[in-house]
Image (cartoon, grey):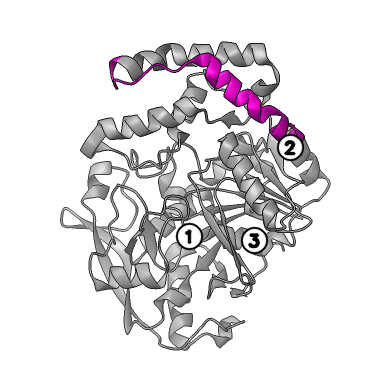
Amino acid sequence: MPALVLLGAQWGDEGKGKATDLLGGSVDYVVRYQGGNNAGHTVVVGDQKYALHLLPSGILSPGCTPVIGNGVVVDPAVLLSELSGLNERGVDTSKLLISGNAHLITPYNVTLDKVGERFLGKRKIGTTGRGIGPTYADKINRVGIRVQDLYDESILTQKVEAALELKNQLLAKLYNRRAIDPAKIVDGLLDYADQIKPFVADTTLILNNAIDEGKVVLFEGGQGTLLDVDHGTYPFVTSSNPTAGGACTGAGVGPTKINRVIGILKAYTTRVGAGPFPTELFDKDGEALRTIGGERGVTTGRDRRCGWFDAVIARYATRVNGLTDFFLTKLDVLTGWEQIPVCVAYEIDGKRVEELPYSQTDFHHAKPIYEMLPGWTEDISKAKTFAELPKNAQAYVKALEEMSGAPISAIGVGPGRDETIEINSFLS
């Protein structure tokens, strides 16, 4: 049975939660391998809607073990709040596993994130202000706090004091803020220790053993390919690696154990936060996509920037992730347009460019070159097979598949769990 990576092939918010949840009934483990509570998934089960920020989507699937891997940064307050909310709605969360090597988001990380963004002013990145970036910075600077540190008060105290030695100087002298008392941080973190302890495990060992035993393991990325800190539209990116390679480092599983890599593509394009976006629309079409698609960030509550489908980005995602399949979501949102533009290339300095430019300057100045495809007016939300889609909708999907470089194996035709057309099984 396969080990699969499922990730966003655009700027995030493509519908990864729906895709993960769709597979959840057939999957033994669902693993978040990077990011934190800056990533949001909306999953609709029957008439119930669940907004998940930190927890893997598989937590909603009975029989599936949800895992927070070592590459994730965990805000303990958010974790416990999210667990409590699901428990109140009758969701069993007892099978959750958390890597002892995952790093903790501390209150001072959140403070520095917020004051740092305000200090940047017009140059701000557009972070969620949840302490994600500063926590990853602490990890790389080797002053981070890990989950396992909660169970050795002496080590925890030493690490918090070391981390705050420089940070308090920054807060007081640069940002004109009060210094933070290390003892209060330690006491606050220790308050979470007993509540989190039942979930803490050696997740790397568990996952490798599961794959060796033939279990199905699904690695779930947050954000999207174009927000990857190495391969995205830097500096307007997240602080981790949502691309397929991040699954290996963020979960401790070797690349030879991954069988398939599935990219989630929205039938148009959206983005939250600052940064270049060649197909962004500022007219009534952009507003219609935003309204019909319900394009508001699950975690941030911010309206998403909307634009037409960008095949250049899709091809790039196929290349850097080694995608084997696409899951195309929100095709139903495009119902009603007489013609639908698709960006097939860019114009940069008067030249046609068909691959994503590596230069930040070139990408910032890229102008979309569109190909017009015929639209459809029929309701597609009840379609169960590809053949039941209107001919023009079929042609749209086939065109996107050809332009993107990997087969489209599933299509979302509505927000519900059952509103999906499966063309090829991801588990074969």
Q: Residue 337's image quarter?
A: bottom left
Query: Label 2 vs label 1: CA separation?
Result: 29 Å
Task: Examine the rendering and report whether any part of residue 344 can be seen.
Answer: yes
Mark 2–mark 1 CB contact (< 8 Å):
no
Quadrant of the rendering where the C terminus is positioned: bottom right
- Helix, strand or loop: magenta stretch: helix
Query: Which of the pair 39/342 is nearer the observer?
Result: 39
Q: Amino acid at mark 3?
A: Asp
Q: Amino acid at mark 2?
A: Phe
Which mark identifies residue 224?
A: none
Which mark identifies residue 21?
A: 3
Disc with the residue nearer the chain's start (1 vs 3): 1
User: Residue at point 72% right, 44% down?
Assistant: 96
- In this view, 277 is above or below 295: above
Instruction: Give, as a single range, the part of the protein colored magenta.
Output: 173-200
Query: Label 1 vs label 3: CA separation?
Result: 14 Å
* Local secondary structure at mark 1: loop
* Image x and y of residue 158, in percent: 58, 10
